[in-house]
Amino acid sequence: MTGKKLAIYITSAVVVAALGWGGVFYWKNLRGIWPAIGGIPGDAGGVNSTDLPLKLPPGFSISVFAKDLPGARVIVQDSFGNWWVSQTSEGKVSLLEVKDGKVVSQNVVFDNLNNPHGLAVDPQSPFIFYVAEEDKISRVNIYSEGGLEKIADLPAGGGHSTRTISFGPDGRLYVSIGSSCNVCDESDNRRAKIFSMNKDGGDLREFARGLR
């Protein structure tokens, strides 16, 4: 094979590989995005009150509810109609106080946390609030002087460090613990699983496994 032919062969292989990667990336991440950025057939002008380049169909509107919340990930509403937001990369949980559908105040309530992500309110005790950090789950009586009380330790380190929590119909608290990597044998038997526990962190039970 001559040098010219070899160069053509390598270039063709690179192009094919790039197109293949681009196709996979589009399918996983951008599929269905065109109506939002390119408009929809017969776009009659939904209302966009933001500075985002979005086009909406008739009868729809979009506006900014809250801003200046870097790292915002999970949001839950409490019994007062206020919203709690985890700011994972900032190590914070903020409270958005709402009146007549608008945020009237915004404050950091918990700070210096270890990658806080999952938030949950006890459906049977609406003032008991749970926060899942990378390495633990804590609870607190909100709108009080109390601080976070750790109820469970979680494995930390490696990849997939965010912990999502939610109450199930059985009244137990569920937590997802991601794998430490994409392909490996886990050294900690709690990784890549979902567990459930009592509200005080006791009676930890495996619910599902094999979940990255």
Image: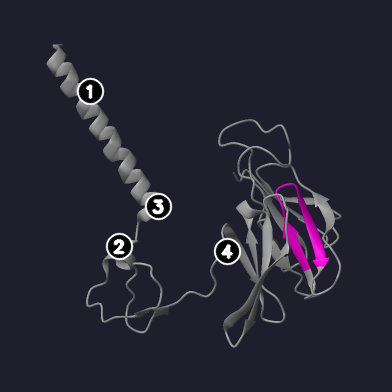
**Distance Cα–Cα, label 1 vs label 2:** 33 Å
Q: Position of residue 100 (x, y in %)?
A: 59, 88
Q: Secondary structure at mark 4?
A: loop
Residue 107 sits in which quadrant? bottom right
If you read the primary sequence from the N terminus, does the residue marked by circle 2 or circle 3 appear first? 3
The residue under label 4 is 69
Badge 4: how crowded within 10 Å, few (<14), some, or many (20+)? some
The residue under label 3 is 29
Residue in front for this viewpoint, 173 or 67:
67
The residue under label 2 is 34
Q: Nearer the viewer, mark 2 or mark 4?
A: 4
Above or below residue 152? Residue 94 is below
If you read the primary sequence from the N terminus, does the residue marked by circle 1 or circle 2 appear first? 1
Color style of the picture: one colour
The residue under label 1 is 10
Badge 1: how crowded within 10 Å, few (<14), some, or many (20+)? few
If you read the primary sequence from the N terminus, does the residue marked by circle 2 or circle 4 appear first? 2
